[in-house]
Amino acid sequence: MPPPKCLSWMFISLFFLLLIAMISGCSTLKDSRPILPIKEYEKMIVGRFDADYVGTANCLAACHEHDRLRQDFDASTMGAQLKKESGLPLVDCESCHGPGSLAIKGLTRELVEENTKKGIKTKCDFETLIDMKNLPAPAQSLTCLKCHTANATFNLHNWNASTHATNEVSCFDCHQVHGSPDLKVSPINTGQMCFRCHLAPRAEFSMPSHHPLNEKRIFCIDCHDTHGGIGDRHLRKETIKETCVQCHPEKRGPFVYEHADVLEDCLNCHVPHGSVNDNLLVAREPFLCLQCHEGHRINTPGGGSTSAASRRAFYSRCTDCHSRIHGSDVPSASGKGRFTQ
Ligand code: HEC
Ligand code: HEC
Ligand code: HEC
Ligand code: HEC
Ligand code: HEC
Ligand code: HEC
Ligand code: HEC
Ligand code: HEC
Ligand code: HEC
């Protein structure tokens, strides 16, 4: 019936017109103006609106307690931003701790010196600053993300969707801003840092067959991106196979004789961290192979011999004969791909 068809075309074109109107209207949203300046948010977090920014010089001049913090901070990449001539966004104490005028109210250099002579430590009223340690995890992370946006810091592209972000893990859990001048986490420290929360991997890496993590030849972050990966399980690579063949390239293939598509997922036969079985295998041979194959029966092409000894042998280590289990370019005796050479 023509009339309804005509009507639906009208609706469709109307829809597209509306869509175009909406998209062009949205362009103003692109120049992202904050609804409130960050300052106002920080005041809200503190719960007071009368605080103001005083600048790092004022914070630190009043109080010598933080000398080490300052030294570390100056030496760090973020601290380098304190130098105005760098032209980069300024990072100072108040960028994270919030406006500090209330904290240093009444504190003068003279007072601090007087107190020091008397042997008294001068405390600032730090309770008027943002209570970093007790903020909810997402708010803690926002402290960092206001500068480290996905655009500014590429490796945080997947953070918001990451299992860490959605499980209340915050930047503070891993990055100790005042731990040392090095804000980065060096690979060698990741094991212990991750084990703090991940007890299963800790046990796995102590099993008889394991990737040499405790031996410091491989690191969690070789395979995982703690900020969220492109693959499942925070993996840096899209697939399991890609994850593994970066270091085991000889298993990549393609081979003339492939083990069907079994090799597409190395975890069909291996575990990634550690195993009680040799070679990180999920199960010992022959059980590993018997999950998918029957063993040789007598008089099958593989089972030429009828002696009891060889029958037993066939149910021992299949890879004694099928030694090219990851794929081969060389045919077997019968001219087929049996991975025997
Ligand atoms: C990049 C953000 C950031 C900057 C910049 C920063 N801090 Fe901190 N600061 C933190 C965090 C996060 C904590 C809480 C650490 C924790 O969880 O123990 C903290 C804690 C502190 C503490 C308490 C330490 C303790 O042991 O409880 C002091 C004091 C401090 N900062 C002073 C400063 C001073 C002074 C500056 C400027 C030189 C500064 N901070 C700059 C993020 C920052
Ligand atoms: C006021 C803006 C600002 C805030 C807030 C901020 N950063 Fe930074 N951060 C920077 C800048 C700028 C750099 C240096 C340039 C760069 O490496 O991106 C930097 C560098 C770093 C680096 C070192 C990168 C490298 O390659 O060495 C780490 C790690 C880091 N920040 C973590 C954090 C964490 C964790 C927080 C929250 C506690 C935080 N930052 C909060 C601006 C900020
Ligand atoms: C589970 C631990 C963990 C958490 C949570 C975490 N990081 Fe990291 N971060 C690391 C490790 C480990 C490295 C060093 C290896 C790497 O780059 O992946 C690192 C590196 C970085 C770097 C340096 C990147 C570079 O390539 O120079 C920045 C910047 C950074 N993290 C910021 C953040 C911010 C901001 C957050 C919170 C949104 C955060 N991290 C949360 C562990 C963590
Ligand atoms: C050789 C690469 C590799 C290294 C190194 C590695 N992992 Fe993994 N990890 C994987 C793979 C692959 C998976 C996915 C397993 C799956 O999907 O069943 C995984 C899964 C996980 C999981 C989720 C599943 C589970 O077992 O609970 C956690 C948590 C984990 N890894 C933590 C760690 C930690 C912590 C370290 C360092 C101490 C580490 N991994 C080192 C490859 C690795
Ligand atoms: C403060 C605690 C904490 C720290 C530190 C931590 N994690 Fe996690 N991680 C978690 C929680 C919570 C989860 C989600 C629940 C789970 O799977 O156990 C998780 C999940 C994971 C997963 C599974 C992701 C998925 O999609 O299933 C991987 C992989 C992982 N973490 C790797 C690491 C690595 C590598 C490090 C060290 C750089 C690390 N974690 C440090 C708390 C932590
Ligand atoms: C960052 C490099 C790296 C990645 C990624 C990696 N491996 Fe390894 N793998 C190693 C190193 C190093 C060894 C130890 C080799 C040695 O001892 O000579 C090893 C050893 C092994 C072994 C032999 C273990 C034994 O007990 O002898 C197997 C099996 C293995 N890897 C499988 C995998 C699988 C499966 C993956 C993917 C989940 C993977 N590897 C990813 C570096 C890597
Ligand atoms: C069909 C089961 C199976 C699959 C799938 C499989 N492997 Fe293996 N792999 C084995 C067996 C069995 C051994 C031990 C016997 C041997 O060396 O042939 C082994 C040993 C290894 C070894 C240590 C010895 C050597 O040859 O270097 C590495 C490394 C390895 N595999 C990597 C991988 C990688 C990477 C993948 C994925 C691309 C993978 N494996 C997929 C069965 C498998
Ligand atoms: C996850 C299942 C799976 C596991 C585990 C597995 N295979 Fe296979 N295998 C297959 C599939 C699927 C094929 C291709 C289909 C076929 O020809 O039967 C195959 C093919 C083969 C072939 C070649 C058959 C032919 O017709 O050319 C041999 C030989 C073989 N596998 C031996 C092994 C051995 C030895 C093991 C143990 C180390 C093993 N397989 C583990 C699934 C598996
Ligand atoms: C003593 C050496 C030897 C052992 C041990 C052995 N095989 Fe074989 N297998 C062979 C030979 C030889 C062939 C035939 C090769 C040809 O066709 O050229 C074969 C063929 C096969 C085939 C393809 C033909 C068929 O029968 O369907 C599969 C699948 C296979 N073996 C699986 C296994 C499994 C699983 C194990 C361990 C339980 C195992 N093999 C142990 C020597 C062996």
Image: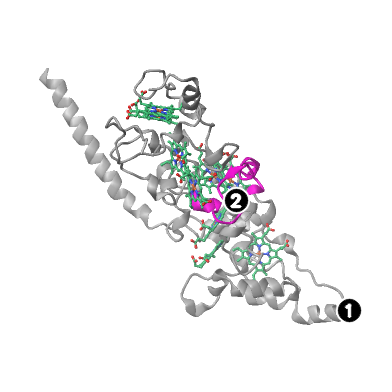
Extreme residue toward the right, this view: 118
Q: Is residue 137 left or right of residue 149?
A: right
Measuring 60% from the left and 51% from the top, which residue is drawn there? 170
The residue singled out by tag 2 in the image is 170
* Mark 2 or mark 1, earlier in chain: 1
Q: Is mark 2 within 8 Å of ligand 3?
A: yes
Badge 1, how many Cα within 10 Å: few under 14, some, many 20+? few
Q: State whether residue 124 is above or below residue 86.
A: above
Quadrant position of residue 76 = bottom right
Numbered disc total:
2
- Say which of 286 and 125 sits in front: 286
Q: Position of residue 95 (x, y in %)?
A: 58, 65
The residue singled out by tag 1 in the image is 118
Measuring 28% from the left and 39% from the top, which residue is drawn there? 256
Question: What is the quadrant of the N terminus in the image?
Answer: top left
Q: State whether residue 256 is above or below residue 52.
A: above
Region in magenta: 195-224
Quadrant position of residue 9 = top left
Question: What is the quadrant of the C terminus in the image?
Answer: top left
Residue 40, visible in the rendered structure: no
Q: Amino acid at mark 1?
A: Lys
Q: Is residue 6 left or right of residue 41?
A: left
- Say which of 151 and 299 sits in front: 299
Q: Position of residue 270 (x, y in %)?
A: 49, 37
User: Considering the numbered disc 2 on the image, is that residue within a helix, a strand or a loop?
Assistant: loop
User: Considering the numbered disc 1 on the image, is that residue within a helix, a strand or a loop?
Assistant: helix
Q: Position of residue 29 (x, y in %)?
A: 37, 52
